Image (spheres, rainbow, N blue to C red):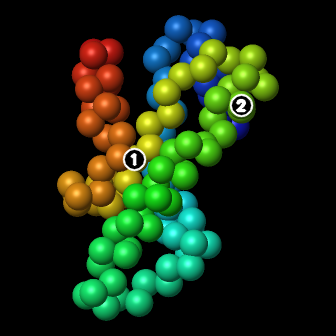
Amino acid sequence: MTDIAVLAQARRQNIPAYLVCSKADYHIHSIMSEMGYHGEGKEEDVEHRNELYEAAREHFVETRKARETLEEAKLPDQHLYTVSSTMLNKNPEGTIDEADRLKDLGDQT
């Protein structure tokens, strides 16, 4: 069953559903590579890496296609939570939308 089919079925049955992108790190690092960063690993490169990470993260968040996909499927717009796989592995420095996701999940219960 596709993601859209799952969302449509959940909507028909009045079951809360959440959109979560859990591969954000992979996509952000791919964008960083496209920007010319290849993980040189030098300590003096940390500031440059952090700047590129922030720019790539912003680009990724702004260009997600969830809204268009939902619209095409005639489903209502809803928030897409972008979570870091680093955070899923318990590294709090990699948070993106984790706090929002956890708050909204708590509000639903």
Pick the residue in front: 38 or 7. 38
Counting from the top left corner in percent of width and height, residue 70 is at 68, 26
Callout 2 amino acid:
Glu
Q: How many neighbours does mark 2 have within 10 angstroms: few (below 14), some (14-19), or many (20 or more)? A: few
Q: Which residue in the protein does label 1 denote? A: 83
Query: What secondary structure is marked by label 1?
Result: loop
Instruction: Please state if 57 lies on the left or on the right of 101 as rendered.
Output: right
Q: Quadrant of residue 44?
A: bottom left
Helix, strand or loop at label 2? It is helix
In percent of width and height, residue 67 lies at: 64, 29
Question: First in sequence: mark 2 or mark 1?
Answer: 2
Q: CA distance from mark 2 to mark 1?
A: 20 Å
Quadrant holding the N terminus: top right
What residue type is disc 1 on? Answer: Val
In the image, residue 38 sits, relative to residue 104, either above or below, namely below
Residue 9: tell me if it is visible. Answer: no
- Tag shown at residue 68: 2
Relative side of 57 to 12, left or right: left
Question: Callout 1: 10 Å neighbours few (<14), some, many (20+)?
Answer: many
